[in-house]
Image (spheres, rainbow, N blue to C red):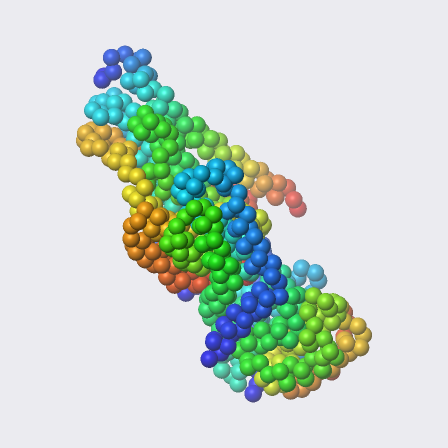
Amino acid sequence: MALSLHINGVQLERGGRSLFPPLTVSTGAGTLLYVRGANGAGKTTLLRALAGLASPSAGEVAWRQDGNPTTAAAATTFVGHANAMNDALSVIENLSYATSLAGQIYRPVLVGAALEQLGVFNLALRRVGTLSQGQRKRASLARLLLREQPGARAWLLDEPFVALDVDTQKMLEQLIAQELKAGAIVVLTSHQDFAIDSAKTTEVLL
Amino acid sequence: MSLRLASTAVARREFQLFARRKSDWANPLMFFVIVCSLFPFAVGSESERLRLIGVGVIFVGALLATLLTLPRLFDEDARDGSLDLLLSSNEPLAMLILARVAALSFGIGAPLILAAPLFSFLYALPADVALMLALGVAIAVPTLLLVGAIAAALLVSARGGAILTAVLVLPLTIPTLIFGAGAALKVLFGESPVAELSLQAAYLLFALALSPLAASAALKISTD
Amino acid sequence: MARTEQQSNDRFQGRWFWRYASPAAFYPVAGRIEKLSWALAAILAIVGLYIGFFRAPTDAQQGEVYRVIYIHVPAAWMAMIIYLAMAFWAATGLVLGTRLSFMMSHALAPTGAIMAVIALWTGALWGRPTWGTYWVWDARLTSTLILFFLYVGYIALAAAFDDKKKGDRASALIALVGAVNVPIIYFSVNWWNTLHQGSSVRPGSSSMASIMLTAMLIMTFAFWAYCVAAAMHRLRTQIIEREAETKWVKELVK
Amino acid sequence: MIWESWSAFWDMGGRGFFVWGSYGALLIAIVAELMALRSARKKALESVVELKRLP
């Protein structure tokens, strides 16, 4: 049950220009990969490439499960700037959609526990359109906790602390630390300072 | 197994949205109703004249109403980020798009199919023509949505979406328009519509086979 | 199956055809093709028009107005052929990821659209004395009109993207979708045409004297050469635009 | 020479408008395209010059 990520000479383009020189990084289970860089350096694009949502112009991104190649779709959960929730549907409906697409069986108990952990259990049946930005963000983070078992998926977090209050940020930091202990890989971009207790942190400066 | 799970989820979400936001299916219907009601003012109300243009008006009206719903396919999802869920699914994207188009055809198509015969009577068309029209619209709506899904997918990240969608999609709907309206006209003139109807259905099958693949390629291009 | 240009490069490096997949290598070749094509177009057009107007006799049925076919039919053919060529290069671009292929598609499209317009315009002017009206919904004219719409869609789509690479791939895909649908549209328009009316007289359909046919064929080659020349010119302009930051383009301009 | 005179040639058996209207349109289209080609080339070259002037 060990996940590993191999970024091999990856280059990404935006508008026909390369964003950064070829990037080569390999990480294994329990690593926090902290992607840093100025605005427009290509952090989000890199995360999207890791999630399989963008294709590199050169090089390749490889995910391995116990040494065997696996797809980004099976190995990762990506939480980006947008919340991936439809305003007209309830939190539960949105999460059930997300889990089904991620190829998991939707278990209400699991969803309940995830929402509970993020402190938004009482919002489960509310339409997303009626929630505040912070509440939406928390609800969308619940997607991370719907994996098969702790540590089973890599988390790709693009600016996860935006719109979160201090307490929620602390809680998220703890969740990330726990997930890392369970053997996950967490890739993270952030403009805010954070304190995550991790055995191994790799910094990537774009 | 998990493909079935995922495509059911896609279709179910579409129906949930239809139930939550009635305007999603009511607006195209209203558009269709109003377009169909405008023509007699322009061409006159003699039954003979109406009967001749009726089939065409109703068919084109239904196609345009369906065209209006194309941005709903991917635009909203692209804005709120849920398109990424679809794209990062392990299941074949083409099948998920197909599930979505199927649900959308049902949600948009059913009201139009019910409205088409009603308007046939306003255009002094006999009942058998009205039925044939409903059948023709029932085939044309999914055809347009399938072909339109390609354009909608391409235009997710481009400027000038709505008009460009029409420019790209409408020429490709000509076969279904010719055969669908042709079948109803054949019935109107007391001939057998079988040839037209089968050709229209053949074009639907053709679109069914190729469009989801093209649309998934398109979606990957525009979100890359 | 689809590759990036980099991957194709790894695979095909050193092959003769791959050498010219690079814009820098093809630029001078395109220049030579362009020059040759301009010359050919001019010579063929002079010869074709001379035969068409001064050697070919008056048509027994249509009188002198038939002489429009020397440009009407070649333009209609070119509109069709250019669309297929465009789709071919679009497919090549999508499979191999080569920038030059997409540029080739873009370079062809405007000329194709112009050919469609000429075919429509001359068809209308031919139709007036022959059918008594500028426009009839004749199957071939209608198909050419739809072809023109497909060109417009392609050009508009390519222009709708700020990211050139996306625009390339998106428009290539729509060119392919169009190319797959063109035969179906032609068939259905034909079907519809015979259902509603049968106009038996078409430009060039009556039995033509062989000298008329010769003139028409020569004019077709003239059109062909013109289209190649125009496309090559546009291709070179695009190469300059897109490779503006490379050293060789900068050296090109003093 | 199959034409009796130049005026017969221009008249095209009474169909001059249609024949020359077609050829005239072709000429206009070609001239317009050539002009568009030239101005596009000029613009492209100018932007390269512009680019060179930048440090």
In the image, residue B206 lies at what x, y percent?
37, 60
Residue placed at 50% from the left, 41% from the top? B39
Which quadrant of the figure contains the N terminus of chain D?
Answer: top left
Whether B100 is drawn above or below A152: the answer is: above
Q: Is residue B4 visible?
A: yes
The residue that appears at 77% across and 78% down in the rendered structure is: A170
Across and down, in percent, residue A97 comes to 58, 73
x%, y% of residue C28? 42, 43
Work out whether A58 lies above or below B91: above
**Could you tell whether B119 is left or right of D18 in the image?**
right
The residue shown at (27%, 12%) is: D5
- Which image quadrant is residue D48 in? top right
Q: How many numbered marks does the figure carry? A: 0
Query: Taking the image as drawn, is residue A204 in sight?
Result: no
Q: Nearer the viewer, residue B6 or A61?
A: B6
Q: Nearer the viewer, residue B223 or C38?
A: B223
Q: Is residue D24 above or below residue B126?
A: above
D38 left or right of C144 in image: right
Q: Give the residue at the far right of this rendering.
A: A166
- In percent of width and height, residue A204 lies at 66, 71
Q: Give the side of residue C30 with respect to residue B64, left or right.
A: left
Q: Position of A161 compared to A28: left or right?
A: right
